[in-house]
Amino acid sequence: MTASSGGERGNVYAADCPTRLLLDRIADKWTVLLLTTLSDGPMRFNALKRRIEGVSQKMLSQTLRQIERDGLVTRRVEPSVPVSVTYTITPLGQGLVQALRPMIDWAETRMSEVAVAQSAYDARSGEG
Amino acid sequence: MTASSGGERGNVYAADCPTRLLLDRIADKWTVLLLTTLSDGPMRFNALKRRIEGVSQKMLSQTLRQIERDGLVTRRVEPSVPVSVTYTITPLGQGLVQALRPMIDWAETRMSEVAVAQSAYDARSGEG
DNA sequence: CCTTGTGGTTACCAACGGGAACCAGGTGTG
DNA sequence: CACACCTGGTTCCCGTTGGTAACCACAAGG
């Protein structure tokens, strides 16, 4: 093991550690997809819904509320004819997106290797 | 928006995109905690259970099975007296841990700012 | 009047996750 | 020999979570 690689930094392993609680929240698929989408620029509720395939209104409003509370996005309501709600990423949220980028890059570049590993695993467990 | 920041890289927004499926899997709290723990060195089942507070045997074995299938860790069974099962991270898994590190660092350094934002939000929604 | 669009909330139900019991197989103890 | 105990799981039960779809309010358009 390469000395202090992953263990003693803060204490993410304690269930009561606030960093762990935050990590539980940002290591969430809808949060990641929403933040990366919003890092492209402000977007309205239904635009987000159309952009991110498979997200339900429920999870969309719920996750948006959550990341708004965390200070990662701001919610602006324009009292126009059909009321228009725009979500904008904050500098704090932009910082998180930068931190998430390596993970997304990894998923994109290493995906094929993972697929190969999965096939090998399935073949192994198939034969016994 | 800073040109190609978050949108057109692959197409993580399509539900059928394999990268999105992989992202859904690695953006998971137990996966993140397990991989970072194992990046410190091989560890046995119950050692992992003791180290990561709050994880159930069920989720532990389930998540370990999953990341083993993904080629991120290897599972070695030693037929010793009480059978001993050791999990070791693979080079592929180590690469992912490196990619996850910025996210964890962000959580640790920006946590206080998030806490402030939450208090502000709660105060706002409380009064109005 | 009904339909379309906005941004949600709510009811209902399936699926996921946690807790604890149970399992297998050998070891130590009385 | 019976019994509890260690290992690493799996299974059962149940509560919480998330998905589906309906409903809400409001205004424009036909």
Image: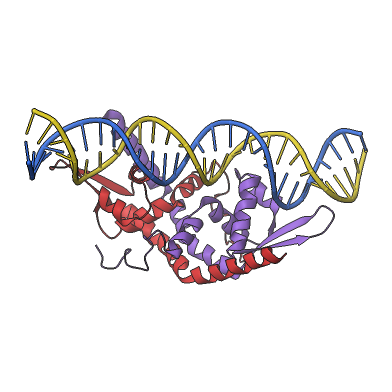
Chain colours: A purple, B red, C blue, D yellow
Find residue A2 and report its horizontal and vertical position in percent.
26, 65
- Residue A12 can be seen in this image: yes
Q: Quadrant of the C terminus of chain A?
A: top left
Residue sitting nearer the eye, D17 or B5: D17
Q: Residue at x 30, y 58 (%)?
A: B39
Q: Quadrant of the N terminus of chain A?
A: bottom left
Residue sitting nearer the eye, D20 or B123: B123
Q: Residue at x 37, y 68 (%)?
A: A10
Find residue A53 and report its horizontal and vertical position in percent.
61, 44
Q: Residue at x 34, y 49 (%)?
A: B72
Residue D28, compared with residue A94, is above or below; it is above
Residue sitting nearer the eye, B68 or A63: A63
- Residue B90 can be seen in this image: no
Looking at the rendered structure, the number of numbered marks drawn on it comes to 0
Q: Quadrant of residue A39?
A: bottom right
Residue sitting nearer the eye, B23 or B12: B23
Q: Is residue B85 left or right of residue A94?
A: left
Q: Is residue B125 left or right of residue B92?
A: right
Find residue A54 and report its horizontal and vertical position in percent.
60, 43
Find residue A74 and report its horizontal and vertical position in percent.
66, 64
